[in-house]
Image: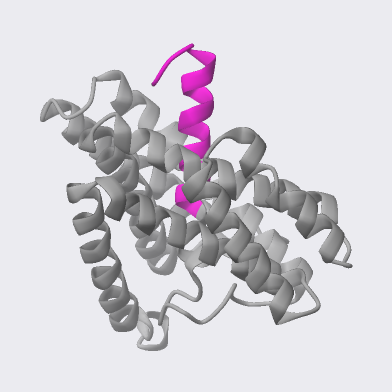
Amino acid sequence: MTERWADLQVRITSAAVLVLVGVVGVYFGGFGFDLLVTLLIAVMVWELAGLTADSAATALGLAVLAAVCLHYAPQVWALLLVPPLGFVLTPRRDRVVLAGYAVALMVAGAGFLDLRSHGVGVFVWLVAIVVASDTMGYFAGRTFGGPKFWPKVSPKKTWSGTIAGWVGALAVGVVFAWLDMVPWYYAMLSPLIALAGQFGDIVESWIKRRAGAKDSSRLIPGHGGVLDRFDALVGAVLALEALGLLLAGPV
Protein backbone atom coordinates (compact mmCIF):
# COMPACT_ATOMS: atom_id res chain seq x y z
CA MET A 1 0.00 0.00 0.00
CA THR A 2 2.80 2.39 0.95
CA GLU A 3 4.74 1.63 -2.23
CA ARG A 4 1.66 2.40 -4.31
CA TRP A 5 1.65 6.01 -3.12
CA ALA A 6 5.41 6.37 -2.58
CA ASP A 7 5.79 9.15 -5.15
CA LEU A 8 2.66 11.07 -4.19
CA GLN A 9 4.28 13.74 -1.99
CA VAL A 10 6.94 14.56 -4.56
CA ARG A 11 4.34 14.66 -7.34
CA ILE A 12 2.11 17.03 -5.35
CA THR A 13 5.00 19.37 -4.49
CA SER A 14 6.18 19.56 -8.09
CA ALA A 15 2.62 20.02 -9.33
CA ALA A 16 2.05 22.87 -6.87
CA VAL A 17 5.10 24.72 -8.20
CA LEU A 18 3.95 24.19 -11.79
CA VAL A 19 0.46 25.44 -10.95
CA LEU A 20 1.85 28.57 -9.26
CA VAL A 21 4.03 29.43 -12.25
CA GLY A 22 1.19 28.68 -14.65
CA VAL A 23 -1.36 30.78 -12.76
CA VAL A 24 0.94 33.79 -12.69
CA GLY A 25 1.72 33.45 -16.40
CA VAL A 26 -1.90 33.00 -17.48
CA TYR A 27 -3.22 35.78 -15.24
CA PHE A 28 -0.81 38.45 -16.46
CA GLY A 29 -0.69 37.23 -20.08
CA GLY A 30 1.21 39.39 -22.52
CA PHE A 31 4.93 38.97 -23.10
CA GLY A 32 5.43 36.92 -19.93
CA PHE A 33 2.89 34.31 -21.01
CA ASP A 34 4.29 34.20 -24.54
CA LEU A 35 7.76 33.65 -23.11
CA LEU A 36 6.51 30.90 -20.79
CA VAL A 37 4.82 29.01 -23.64
CA THR A 38 7.86 29.44 -25.86
CA LEU A 39 10.12 28.07 -23.14
CA LEU A 40 7.84 25.08 -22.51
CA ILE A 41 7.66 24.15 -26.19
CA ALA A 42 11.41 24.58 -26.62
CA VAL A 43 12.08 22.28 -23.67
CA MET A 44 9.63 19.70 -25.02
CA VAL A 45 11.33 19.77 -28.42
CA TRP A 46 14.68 19.41 -26.65
CA GLU A 47 13.40 16.39 -24.73
CA LEU A 48 11.93 14.82 -27.87
CA ALA A 49 15.18 15.33 -29.76
CA GLY A 50 17.10 14.03 -26.76
CA LEU A 51 15.20 10.75 -27.00
CA THR A 52 16.13 10.29 -30.64
CA ALA A 53 19.08 12.45 -31.68
CA ASP A 54 22.65 11.14 -31.61
CA SER A 55 24.09 14.25 -29.97
CA ALA A 56 23.16 16.74 -27.28
CA ALA A 57 24.12 19.57 -29.64
CA THR A 58 21.44 18.47 -32.11
CA ALA A 59 18.78 18.42 -29.41
CA LEU A 60 19.79 21.85 -28.12
CA GLY A 61 19.92 23.33 -31.60
CA LEU A 62 16.43 22.12 -32.45
CA ALA A 63 15.12 23.51 -29.15
CA VAL A 64 16.59 26.94 -29.89
CA LEU A 65 15.16 26.86 -33.41
CA ALA A 66 11.74 25.93 -32.03
CA ALA A 67 11.85 28.84 -29.58
CA VAL A 68 12.86 31.33 -32.27
CA CYS A 69 10.17 30.16 -34.69
CA LEU A 70 7.40 30.16 -32.11
CA HIS A 71 8.31 33.46 -30.49
CA TYR A 72 9.17 35.58 -33.50
CA ALA A 73 7.08 34.08 -36.28
CA PRO A 74 4.25 31.87 -35.00
CA GLN A 75 2.86 31.24 -38.47
CA VAL A 76 2.51 27.79 -40.01
CA TRP A 77 5.43 28.22 -42.42
CA ALA A 78 7.78 29.07 -39.57
CA LEU A 79 6.45 26.35 -37.27
CA LEU A 80 7.19 23.76 -39.93
CA LEU A 81 10.89 24.63 -40.05
CA VAL A 82 11.76 22.49 -37.04
CA PRO A 83 10.41 19.02 -37.99
CA PRO A 84 12.23 18.73 -41.36
CA LEU A 85 15.52 19.64 -39.71
CA GLY A 86 14.81 17.14 -36.98
CA PHE A 87 14.07 14.54 -39.64
CA VAL A 88 17.39 15.16 -41.36
CA LEU A 89 19.47 15.38 -38.20
CA THR A 90 17.97 12.39 -36.40
CA PRO A 91 19.30 9.14 -37.88
CA ARG A 92 16.85 6.85 -36.12
CA ARG A 93 13.80 4.77 -37.00
CA ASP A 94 10.31 6.28 -36.89
CA ARG A 95 11.59 9.63 -38.14
CA VAL A 96 8.33 10.38 -39.96
CA VAL A 97 6.34 9.87 -36.77
CA LEU A 98 8.80 11.92 -34.75
CA ALA A 99 8.70 14.75 -37.28
CA GLY A 100 4.91 14.65 -37.12
CA TYR A 101 5.01 14.84 -33.34
CA ALA A 102 7.37 17.81 -33.54
CA VAL A 103 4.82 19.50 -35.80
CA ALA A 104 2.15 18.76 -33.19
CA LEU A 105 4.24 20.36 -30.45
CA MET A 106 4.80 23.52 -32.46
CA VAL A 107 1.14 23.81 -33.49
CA ALA A 108 0.12 23.20 -29.87
CA GLY A 109 2.37 26.06 -28.80
CA ALA A 110 0.66 28.36 -31.30
CA GLY A 111 -2.67 27.01 -30.01
CA PHE A 112 -1.82 27.97 -26.42
CA LEU A 113 -1.06 31.52 -27.52
CA ASP A 114 -4.28 31.66 -29.55
CA LEU A 115 -6.46 30.40 -26.69
CA ARG A 116 -5.04 32.93 -24.23
CA SER A 117 -5.86 35.71 -26.69
CA HIS A 118 -9.55 34.74 -26.37
CA GLY A 119 -9.50 35.33 -22.62
CA VAL A 120 -8.53 33.58 -19.41
CA GLY A 121 -11.74 31.54 -19.01
CA VAL A 122 -11.31 29.16 -21.94
CA PHE A 123 -7.63 28.60 -21.24
CA VAL A 124 -8.19 27.86 -17.56
CA TRP A 125 -11.08 25.52 -18.47
CA LEU A 126 -8.82 23.57 -20.81
CA VAL A 127 -6.06 23.23 -18.23
CA ALA A 128 -8.55 22.35 -15.49
CA ILE A 129 -10.16 19.47 -17.38
CA VAL A 130 -6.75 18.03 -18.29
CA VAL A 131 -5.61 18.28 -14.67
CA ALA A 132 -8.89 16.77 -13.43
CA SER A 133 -8.67 13.93 -15.93
CA ASP A 134 -5.05 13.22 -15.02
CA THR A 135 -5.69 13.43 -11.27
CA MET A 136 -8.85 11.32 -11.28
CA GLY A 137 -7.17 8.81 -13.58
CA TYR A 138 -4.14 8.58 -11.29
CA PHE A 139 -6.11 7.96 -8.10
CA ALA A 140 -8.73 5.67 -9.67
CA GLY A 141 -6.09 3.65 -11.48
CA ARG A 142 -3.98 3.26 -8.35
CA THR A 143 -7.03 2.46 -6.18
CA PHE A 144 -9.12 0.18 -8.37
CA GLY A 145 -6.66 -1.09 -10.97
CA GLY A 146 -8.37 -3.46 -13.39
CA PRO A 147 -7.98 -4.07 -17.13
CA LYS A 148 -5.34 -2.05 -18.94
CA PHE A 149 -6.42 0.54 -21.48
CA TRP A 150 -3.55 -0.08 -23.90
CA PRO A 151 -1.00 -2.34 -22.19
CA LYS A 152 1.50 -2.56 -25.05
CA VAL A 153 1.92 1.21 -25.19
CA SER A 154 1.04 2.52 -21.72
CA PRO A 155 1.08 -0.40 -19.24
CA LYS A 156 0.08 1.72 -16.23
CA LYS A 157 -3.05 3.23 -17.80
CA THR A 158 -6.24 1.35 -16.80
CA TRP A 159 -9.84 1.52 -17.95
CA SER A 160 -10.90 2.55 -14.44
CA GLY A 161 -8.52 5.50 -14.52
CA THR A 162 -9.48 6.43 -18.08
CA ILE A 163 -13.21 6.49 -17.35
CA ALA A 164 -12.65 8.33 -14.06
CA GLY A 165 -10.76 10.94 -16.07
CA TRP A 166 -13.76 11.46 -18.35
CA VAL A 167 -16.06 11.83 -15.33
CA GLY A 168 -13.70 14.31 -13.69
CA ALA A 169 -13.47 16.35 -16.90
CA LEU A 170 -17.25 16.45 -17.23
CA ALA A 171 -17.61 17.62 -13.63
CA VAL A 172 -15.11 20.41 -14.19
CA GLY A 173 -16.86 21.43 -17.41
CA VAL A 174 -20.20 21.65 -15.62
CA VAL A 175 -18.70 23.80 -12.86
CA PHE A 176 -17.11 26.21 -15.34
CA ALA A 177 -20.36 26.49 -17.31
CA TRP A 178 -22.38 27.02 -14.12
CA LEU A 179 -19.99 29.84 -13.18
CA ASP A 180 -20.53 31.37 -16.66
CA MET A 181 -16.82 31.11 -17.43
CA VAL A 182 -17.53 29.09 -20.60
CA PRO A 183 -20.68 28.26 -22.61
CA TRP A 184 -22.66 25.19 -21.54
CA TYR A 185 -21.71 23.16 -24.59
CA TYR A 186 -18.13 23.28 -23.32
CA ALA A 187 -19.29 21.02 -20.49
CA MET A 188 -20.36 18.42 -23.06
CA LEU A 189 -17.06 18.82 -24.90
CA SER A 190 -15.01 18.29 -21.74
CA PRO A 191 -14.87 14.44 -21.80
CA LEU A 192 -13.94 14.54 -25.50
CA ILE A 193 -11.11 16.98 -24.83
CA ALA A 194 -10.02 14.80 -21.90
CA LEU A 195 -9.93 11.79 -24.23
CA ALA A 196 -7.74 13.74 -26.65
CA GLY A 197 -5.46 14.55 -23.74
CA GLN A 198 -5.26 10.88 -22.80
CA PHE A 199 -4.27 10.01 -26.34
CA GLY A 200 -1.63 12.73 -26.19
CA ASP A 201 -0.22 10.89 -23.19
CA ILE A 202 -0.38 7.55 -25.02
CA VAL A 203 1.45 8.88 -28.09
CA GLU A 204 4.24 10.24 -25.92
CA SER A 205 4.43 6.92 -24.05
CA TRP A 206 4.77 5.10 -27.38
CA ILE A 207 7.64 7.37 -28.43
CA LYS A 208 9.43 6.76 -25.13
CA ARG A 209 9.01 3.01 -25.42
CA ARG A 210 10.40 3.06 -28.95
CA ALA A 211 13.37 5.06 -27.63
CA GLY A 212 13.81 2.72 -24.67
CA ALA A 213 13.27 5.51 -22.13
CA LYS A 214 11.09 5.63 -19.02
CA ASP A 215 10.85 9.44 -18.90
CA SER A 216 11.48 12.19 -21.42
CA SER A 217 13.93 13.74 -18.91
CA ARG A 218 14.32 14.25 -15.16
CA LEU A 219 13.58 17.96 -14.99
CA ILE A 220 10.44 17.66 -12.82
CA PRO A 221 10.77 15.52 -9.66
CA GLY A 222 8.03 12.89 -9.46
CA HIS A 223 6.81 13.57 -12.99
CA GLY A 224 9.82 13.02 -15.24
CA GLY A 225 10.20 15.61 -17.95
CA VAL A 226 8.21 18.58 -19.19
CA LEU A 227 6.94 16.44 -22.06
CA ASP A 228 5.74 13.83 -19.55
CA ARG A 229 3.81 16.48 -17.65
CA PHE A 230 2.34 18.40 -20.59
CA ASP A 231 1.75 15.66 -23.18
CA ALA A 232 -1.95 15.48 -22.31
CA LEU A 233 -2.31 19.25 -22.55
CA VAL A 234 -0.72 19.12 -26.01
CA GLY A 235 -3.31 16.56 -27.14
CA ALA A 236 -6.14 18.57 -25.61
CA VAL A 237 -5.25 21.91 -27.19
CA LEU A 238 -4.77 20.27 -30.59
CA ALA A 239 -8.25 18.74 -30.36
CA LEU A 240 -9.78 22.05 -29.30
CA GLU A 241 -8.09 23.95 -32.11
CA ALA A 242 -9.19 21.28 -34.61
CA LEU A 243 -12.78 21.63 -33.41
CA GLY A 244 -12.46 25.37 -33.83
CA LEU A 245 -11.38 24.92 -37.45
CA LEU A 246 -14.22 22.48 -38.12
CA LEU A 247 -16.72 24.94 -36.70
CA ALA A 248 -15.13 27.79 -38.71
CA GLY A 249 -14.18 29.85 -35.68
CA PRO A 250 -12.98 29.67 -32.09
CA VAL A 251 -14.71 26.87 -30.20
> x, y (%) of residue 138?
40, 63
Q: Quadrant of residue 152?
A: bottom right
Q: Is residue 246 magenta?
A: yes
Q: Is the residue 58 above or below the residue 234 in the image?
A: below
Where is residue 222 drawn, in percent x and y? 41, 80
Q: Residue furthest left?
A: 179
Observer-nearest of 109 and 20: 109
**Number of residue marks:** 0
Q: Where 33 sits versus 227, above or below?
A: above
Horizontally, residue 53 falls left or right of residue 166, namely right
Name the quadrant of the N terminus.
Answer: bottom left
Q: Does the image show residue 91?
A: yes
Query: Where does residue 109 sit, x and y in percent of width and height?
Result: 49, 46
Asked if residue 161 lies left or right of residue 150, the reply is left
- Quadrant holding the C terminus: top left
At 51% from the left and 33% from the top, the residue drawn is 239
Q: Nearer the viewer, residue 232 or 245?
A: 245
Q: Which residues are magenta?
A: 232-250
Relative vertical location of residue 74 with respect to residue 87 in this rendering, above or below: above
Predominant SS of the magenta segment? helix
Q: Of 16 and 22, which appears nearest the observer?
A: 22
Q: Is residue 20 magenta?
A: no
Residue placed at 54% from the left, 26% from the top? 242
Of all residues, the one furthest to the front in this rendering is 72
Residue at x-position 30% and y-position 39%: 123
> On the picture, is 201 further left or further right than 87?
left
